[in-house]
Amino acid sequence: MKRIRYFDLLRVICFSIVVFYHMMIQLYFNGMFAMDAIEPFFVTANINTGVVAVTLFFMLSGASLVISTKDSVDWKQFYIKRFIRLLFPFYFVNICWFIIRAIRAKSIFALIEGIAPWKILLGVLGIDEWLTLYGVSGFSQGIGEWFLGCLIILYVLFPIFRKLMLKNKILFSAIVISVYVAVIYNYSSSIPVYQNILVKGCEFIFGMYLGAYQGSLNKKAVVVSLPVVVFYLTGKTPLGINSAVNITVCALAFFITVSFTENVLQKSTYFYKWIAFLSGCSYELFLIHHLVIYTLTPIAKQYMHNKTHVLVLFIIELAVMGILTLAVKNICDYFIKRIKGRALPSVGNIEGI
């Protein structure tokens, strides 16, 4: 199957936005800057770019899965391949972080005392942090956050989504859009709407449709999508519509706009090598970046006296993230190649991450 290069570009753009967003927001949580001072870096009149990037990840996941299962599918190998690639790095980072925490606490038992076995099981399944949104406390160390658990649930449901979409694309799309509209316009939960699994599920399915029609979009589509993206990123006028709609529309427009870079990326061999390299490290970076930011930012707080100091902090955080990401990726790739067995095809990137 020919690799779709703009998927890698999208992945790199999105994780860059998410990492920057988390670095910025920690300045606020650590009392270094007021929210008004940092919001202009990631909030516009209608969107939060960090939330748009997360939405794009879900769409990219749906699109990638549809394309990778375009032909006949061995669902057993489908799940083995993806969950090995998804969970092994997750376990590795969790174990390493647990050991570091135990050394700091000078006790392993202090970290697990009073925690029921079933809560540890939720951590093994990778859904503990996601379940905390619904009041179910587990044994989460904050690795992967709610995103990973939500994505795992959607991976499990993907064969059902795919079957329904292939059976009747129009009817299924109408149902999904109806669910999306009903949820966001009647939303009363304390969980932020952008973290709601029904909303994320709909956006995941929107991505499936983008994947299904990948390569068949009329070139005139970018004439519409590009101005939409520019407006959302630079516009000063609030539209006055539901914030979730703004996020989804911006993400869809951004996805479509970037899709028209495919021909350029196919010709730009050297540039794409770097994009592919960064894209290939995105999942490991996703798992690690919170730990680095949450650890280094509080330590650096006493040294933060001006914007130059903040810049130095960001450079140090990025350097540490880069070193740890490469270390984790190389170690995990080494073991994954030996775990997967001869019957399993090569295990590549996690779709969408």
Image (cartoon, rainbow, N blue to C red):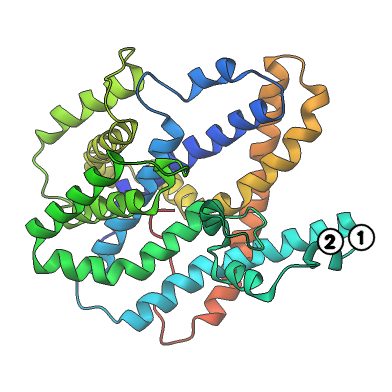
Amino acid type of the residue tagged 1 in the rendering: Lys
According to the image, label 1 marks what residue? 106
Q: Residue furthest right?
A: 106
Mark 1, other Cα within 10 Å: few <14 / some 14–19 / many ≥20: few
Label 2: which secondary element: helix
Residue 29, relative to residue 309: is it above or below? below
Residue 168, relative to residue 117: is it above or below? above
According to the image, label 2 marks what residue? 102
Taking the spot 53% from the left edge, 33% from the top edge, the residue there is 21
Is residue 52 something one can see in this rendering? yes
Amino acid type of the residue tagged 2 in the rendering: Ala
Is residue 108 something one can see in this rendering? no
Assign the N terminus to one quadrant of the image. bottom left
- Is there CB contact under 8 Å for labels 1 and 2? yes
Asked whether 176 or 167 is in front, the reply is: 176
Asked whether 141 or 68 is in front, the reply is: 141
Taking the spot 37% from the left edge, 49% from the top edge, the residue there is 8
Taking the spot 54% from the left edge, 70% from the top edge, the residue there is 125
Q: Quadrant of residue 75?
A: bottom left
Residue 291, relative to residue 97: is it above or below? above
Residue 248, relative to residue 352: is it above or below? above
Asked whether 273 or 81 is in front, the reply is: 81
Q: Quadrant of residue 184?
A: top left
Asked whether 23 or 220 is in front, the reply is: 23
- Give the image location of residue 133, x and y in percent: 52, 51
**201 displayed left or right of 95:** left
Number of numbered markers: 2
**141 displayed left or right of 231:** right
Taking the spot 58% from the left edge, 54% from the top edge, the residue there is 287
